[in-house]
Amino acid sequence: MTIAVATALGATAPAKPAAKTAAPVSKSAAPSKAPAKSPAAAKPAAKTAAPADTTPAPARKPYANVFADGPGRPIADGACLLCHSPMLVTQQAKDSAAWEKTLTQMIGWGSPVTTAQRDTLRRYLLGHYGTHPPTVK
Ligand code: HEC
């Protein structure tokens, strides 16, 4: 396809050779592929490469990488950060039951949350990383 178009342009419009010399980089890559693949096979490859290059990443704030201030923060700092970053927690939006389930799982894996701390921690997590989290600046 590409070869056919270039040939047609060259044959019908003598002024076009200037455009051909302006793209030596793409032309140098093309000949190595062209003999092995048919023009039809080369076309889809060019199409799939284009969207990845032109689609911009969505702009958004990163999740906080420290726990929010509050009564549960010392507990979270002491019981959660020995295994993973706070961002794994701050990116959540769990309801009370889901936080309970997570705490059970984390404690089962070795998180040193005491029975006395657990309620305070769950309420803290729900308040800051619940299903309707407060706006974080
Ligand atoms: C003993 C190590 C350990 C401790 C301590 C720990 N975690 Fe985790 N946590 C993990 C591991 C491992 C994963 C990844 C699990 C996965 O990818 O399936 C994880 C994943 C998570 C996740 C994401 C997955 C989910 O279930 O939503 C949350 C939220 C979480 N931890 C919260 C906490 C909280 C809150 C604490 C403190 C009370 C804590 N973790 C303490 C090991 C730990």
Image (tube, rainbow, N blue to C red):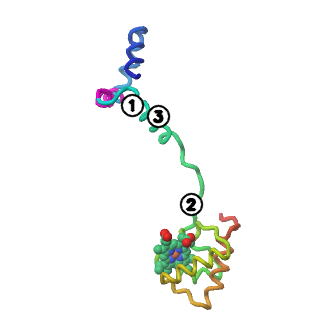
Q: Which residue is mark 2?
A: 62
**Disc 2/disc 3 C-alpha distance (Å):** 31 Å
Using the rendered image of the protein, determine whether residue 81 is visible from the camera's viewpoint. Answer: no
Residue 121: x and y in percent read 62, 82
Q: Of callouts 1 and 2, which one flags the residue occurring earlier in the amino acid sequence?
A: 1
Q: Is residue 22 left or right of residue 53?
A: left
**The residue under label 3 is which amino acid type?**
Lys
Q: Secondary structure at mark 2?
A: loop
Q: Which residue is mark 3?
A: 47
Near mark 1 (Cα within 10 A), the count class, few <14, some 14-19 or many ≥20, is few
Residue 70: x and y in percent read 65, 79
Numbered badge on residue 23: none
Q: Which residue is mark 1?
A: 41
Given contact means CB atoms under 8 Å apart, are the residues at marks 1 and 3 in contact?
A: no
Q: Residue at x 67, y 75 (%)?
A: 126
Q: Residue at x 39, y 12 (%)?
A: 10
Using the rendered image of the protein, determine whether residue 48 is visible from the camera's viewpoint. Answer: yes
Q: Of callouts 1 and 3, which one flags the residue occurring earlier in the amino acid sequence?
A: 1
Q: Is residue 12 above or below residue 132?
A: above
For the record, the magenta segment spans: 26-35
Ligand 1 within 8 Å of disc 3? The answer is no
